[in-house]
Amino acid sequence: MAGTITKYTNDGAGNFSAGVIISNTAGDVRSLYSDDLDGDGDTDILFASVASNGRFGWLENDGSGNFSVEQQIGSTLPHDRYR
């Protein structure tokens, strides 16, 4: 679905779970990065979107696989370059 970020969990045998939408406000995502961004041992998500004149967002993992509401952390994407 356009404008969403969806999580699929791998069971280790090459199978994936049904998708779970973790953000439906991300807009037109052009880049997505997952890593432990806050040093708490779980994988968070950082993304760049060209929606709303470009922005960077962070979705914090609570350690149980649930993600926070998007936290906008910047809005300086050179969006014309990525259209």
Image (cartoon, rainbow, N blue to C red):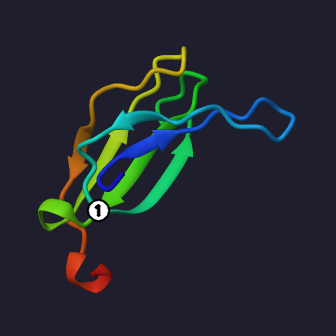
Q: In the visual, does 9 lie left or right of 51?
A: right
Tell me what residue is drawn at x 22 percent, y 53 percent. Answer: 74
Question: Which residue bears the numbered disc 1?
Answer: 28
Q: In the visual, does 64 lie left or right of 73?
A: right
Amino acid bearing label 1: Asp
| Spot occupied by residue 64 in the image (x, y as percentages of width and height) | 54, 14
Quadrant position of residue 14: top right
Q: Residue furthest top?
A: 64
- Callout count: 1
Q: Nearer the viewer, residue 18 or 26?
A: 18
The answer to whether 68 is drawn above or below residue 25 in the figure is above
* Quadrant in which the C terminus is drawn: bottom left
Q: Residue furthest right?
A: 13
Tell me what residue is drawn at x 77 percent, y 38 percent. Answer: 15
Tell me what residue is drawn at x 31 percent, y 80 percent. Answer: 82
| Spot occupied by residue 62 in the image (x, y as percentages of width and height) | 46, 17
| Spot occupied by residue 23 in the image (x, y as percentages of width and height) | 33, 38
Q: Residue furthest left?
A: 52
| Spot occupied by residue 17 in the image (x, y as percentages of width and height) | 64, 31
Tell me what residue is drawn at x 46 percent, y 55 percent. Answer: 32
Q: Nearer the viewer, residue 81 or 15?
A: 15
Quadrant position of residue 5: top left
The answer to whether 54 is drawn above or below residue 7 in the figure is below
Q: Residue furthest bottom?
A: 81
Q: Secondary structure at mark 1?
A: loop
The answer to whether 68 is drawn above or below residue 32 in the figure is above
